[in-house]
């Protein structure tokens, strides 16, 4: 007998006055006794997914009917935390330190709401841990007289891990270790564990990345079965593989990537037509080599994405694929999927074709070389690539027209600098510079956006299951707060209830070149939601696009591989009704999982960069730098240094000339007596007072000769 979870939910909704025993639920659903095992299995799955709750009295109910919330616990170094509900749009729940019970940062928990404040803030208590976030902890080992302990590197884990001598792996005090958790914390006892690996000394330049890799559980080695599959893959394209594909090997074709890139997902061909342009975007056909359900596919799904650190890469596929047969390397035949798009002279797409192809890249270009050709007009470089100059000039013209059209429709373009870590041969950070973004980056960006939109529109029109890249509009609260900030600069948004991307992009245009440009860009970026993968098309707010997907990077993003598989089935009209139903069931989970993996990899990348920044500043205590206020909180000012893209804190207790009050609307600290104002975006001069390598933080002191503007009191 097949029991649908929808029927269970309907029955529990009916019995909203009390949770139900298993026998009551079986009776209501007319489930025979011999199907008891099946319904228990379904209920366990629904509990795991957070759809229902099982009480200590073995009753089943709906969380919302029991004043309970299921979510992830986000811990804070001071001991308290917040439960982030799994139901989108539901507000977080504050959990005081004494109400965390046995939960640790990252755990999936059930929380009971105990109070709701007048401003809507909710407070509660963790009542159960559904799923542990981690089985291992990375940290610094300290040897005691009778027992040692591991101090977690992640300060959101507030309990040290006790380690008995027999479980210490002979680690020495101060060494960085990986420890397995043997028992989790209780109200009265710390967690206990055993050291399974000594990672190294704290001053090893490579230790930052090693710690983050282990802390996030990022898999460096591939399973044996996946490696065996990779070893069996042919290293060149055969005549049989070319059969049934468009042969584009005679077209002038290039890849354009960074100097350090080794996996080339995409290549470009372009021609001038009588009425405009013919652009071909060729994407590595990874799906040809990685069958659905294979060991390679399963491992790629688990990883979700490649992870890029300043000193290491954790690829989604073994090197034989990612840097070998799948990579569009120069002078080698490669299988691809091609998006062929025709544009008129004004950059409007007037036609397209999507098909399987075989290509041969003529050159592996870098962003720097293309900039030297198009911007610097470097004669030596232009002579070196003379045969391709017409293609590069066509690329620039079309890309700039596409960019103009995209911005005119309301696509948001944030011009915020990104840091680039410069390493020595031994792996030490020797400089932090601004990541270059030039015309070559814009060419690739526009062409990839065009290909992604074209594929998404094609699949949407076919009305088949698909995986979209979506970006929902910001919440009304966020828009209201952003508008309050704009008012302080004499600007405002119209129609706050139905905000459109164009309204926000117009603001970015207005402030371009003004002192407050960076401030407004940053606050707007923080106000937006995070993009994610979804089986439902909500459009992409930030790009002002009605249909969007990720098609262009299947070597390093699993969703792109899924999109290739779906597109291939659609192109060959091979998706049966059963397959459509199966994909319809699978895609929501694929979207959820890959979005989570993307967020985890981004957090890991950010953490490594932060560690390298702090280490870089460790020998600069006492140095004076110019910067700007990058964040304001009740407890102080965050300042980013203009020279190094490094952020530190001036604690409010170190502002000695007044008592400072936080003005949330103005994003400012204002002196209670003298009205001296420190506002987000203000230039400021600071001194490096302290570099904390334990907590990865930098403390600044204010140079007193710096006098931010003083606000005059208005006469009433």
Image (cartoon, rainbow, N blue to C red):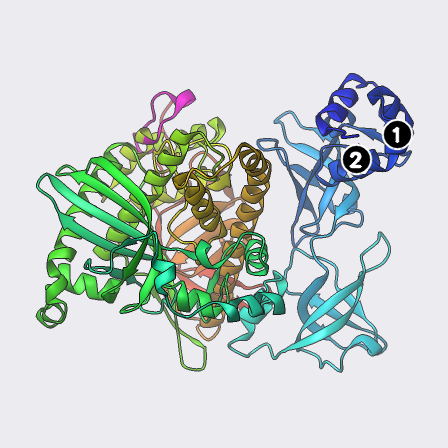
Indicate which disc, 2 or 1, sits on the residue closer to the N terminus.
Answer: 1
Residue 9 painted magenta: no
Query: x%, y% of residue 675?
Result: 42, 40
Q: Find disc 1 in the rendering and name its residue.
A: 22
State the SS at label 1.
Answer: helix
| Image quadrant where residue 375 sits | bottom left
Query: x%, y% of residue 41?
Result: 80, 39
Q: Residue at x 32, y 39 (%)?
A: 454
- In this view, the residue in front, 195 or 116, is 195
- In this view, the residue in front, 194 or 566, is 566
Write the start and end of the magenta stretch as one range: 488-501
**Is residue 586 visible from the viewing direction of this image?**
yes
Q: Is residue 487 left or right of residue 320?
A: left
Query: x%, y% of residue 391?
Result: 15, 56
Disc marking residue 43: 2
Q: Is residue 618 left or right of residue 627?
A: right
Q: Is residue 623 left or right of residue 279?
A: right
């Amino acid at each position: 007998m097949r029991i649908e979870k929808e029927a269970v939910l309907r029955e529990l909704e009916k019995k909203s006055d009390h949770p139900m025993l298993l026998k009551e639920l079986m009776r209501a659903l007319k489930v025979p006794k011999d199907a008891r095992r099946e319904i228990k299995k379904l209920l366990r799955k629904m509990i795991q997914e957070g759809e229902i709750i099982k009480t200590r009295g073995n009753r089943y109910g709906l969380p919302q009917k029991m004043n309970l919330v299921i979510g992830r616990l986000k811990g804070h170094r001071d001991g308290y935390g917040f439960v982030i509900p799994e139901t989108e749009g539901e507000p977080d729940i504050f959990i005081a330190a004494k109400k965390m019970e046995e939960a640790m940062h990252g755990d999936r928990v059930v929380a009971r709401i105990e109070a709701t404040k007048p401003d809507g803030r909710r407070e509660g208590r963790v009542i159960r841990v559904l799923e542990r976030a981690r089985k291992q902890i990375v940290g610094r080992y300290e040897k005691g007289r009778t027992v040692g302990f591991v101090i977690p590197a992640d300060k959101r884990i507030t309990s040290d891990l006790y380690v008995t001598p027999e479980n210490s792996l002979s680690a020495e005090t101060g060494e960085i270790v990986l420890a397995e958790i043997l028992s989790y914390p209780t109200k009265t006892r710390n967690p206990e564990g055993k050291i399974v690996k000594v990672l190294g000394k704290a001053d090893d330049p490579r230790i930052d990345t090693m710690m983050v890799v282990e802390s996030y559980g990022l898999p460096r080695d591939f399973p044996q079965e996946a490696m065996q599959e990779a070893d069996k893959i042919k290293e060149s394209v055969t005549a049989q593989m070319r059969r049934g594909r468009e042969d584009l090997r005679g077209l002038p074709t290039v890849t354009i990537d960074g100097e350090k890139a080794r996996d080339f997902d995409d290549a470009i061909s372009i021609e001038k037509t009588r009425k405009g342009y013919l652009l071909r975007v060729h994407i590595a056909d990874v799906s040809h080599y990685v069958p659905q359900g294979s060991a390679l596919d399963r491992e790629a799904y688990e990883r979700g994405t490649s992870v890029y650190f300043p000193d290491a890469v954790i690829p989604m596929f073994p090197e034989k694929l990612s840097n070998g047969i799948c990579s569009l390397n120069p002078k080698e035949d490669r299988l691809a999927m091609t998006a062929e798009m025709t544009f008129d002279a004004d950059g409007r797409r007037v036609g397209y074709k999507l098909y399987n192809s075989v290509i041969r890249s003529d050159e592996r270009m870098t962003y720097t070389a293309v900039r030297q050709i198009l911007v610097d007009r470097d004669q030596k470089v232009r002579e070196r690539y003379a045969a391709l100059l017409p293609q590069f000039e066509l690329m620039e013209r079309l890309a700039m027209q596409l960019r103009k059209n995209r911005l005119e429709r309301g696509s948001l373009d944030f011009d915020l600098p990104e840091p680039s870590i410069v390493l020595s041969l031994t792996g030490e950070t020797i400089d932090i510079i601004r990541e270059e973004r030039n015309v070559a980056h814009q060419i690739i960006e526009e062409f990839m956006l065009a290909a992604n939109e074209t594929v998404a529109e094609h699949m949407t029109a076919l009305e088949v299951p698909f995986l979209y890249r979506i970006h929902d509009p910001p919440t009304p609260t966020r828009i209201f707060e952003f508008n309050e900030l704009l008012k302080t600069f004499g600007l405002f948004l119209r129609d706050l209830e139905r905000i459109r991307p164009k309204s926000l992009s117009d603001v970015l245009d207005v402030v371009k070149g003004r002192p407050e440009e960076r401030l407004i860009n940053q606050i707007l970026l923080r106000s937006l939601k995070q993009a994610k993968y979804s089986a439902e098309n909500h459009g992409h707010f930030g790009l002002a696009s009605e249909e969007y997907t990720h098609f262009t990077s299947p070597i390093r993003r699993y969703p792109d591989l899924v999109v290739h598989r779906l597109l291939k089935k659609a192109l060959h009209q091979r998706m049966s009704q059963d397959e459509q139903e199966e994909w319809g069931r699978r895609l929501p989970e694929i979207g959820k999982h890959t979005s989570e993996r993307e967020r985890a990899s981004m957090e890991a990348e950010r953490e490594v960069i932060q560690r390298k920044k702090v280490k870089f500043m460790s020998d600069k205590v006492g140095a004076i730098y110019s910067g700007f206020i990058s964040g304001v909180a009740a407890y102080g000012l965050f300042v980013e240094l203009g020279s190094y893209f490094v952020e530190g804190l001036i604690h409010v207790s170190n502002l000695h000339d007044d008592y400072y009050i936080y003005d949330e609307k103005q994003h400012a600290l204002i002196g209670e007596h003298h009205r001296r104002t420190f506002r987000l975006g203000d230039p400021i001069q600071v001194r490096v007072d302290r570099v904390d390598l334990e907590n990865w933080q930098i403390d600044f002191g204010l140079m007193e000769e710096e006098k931010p503007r003083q606000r005059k009191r208005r006469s009433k």
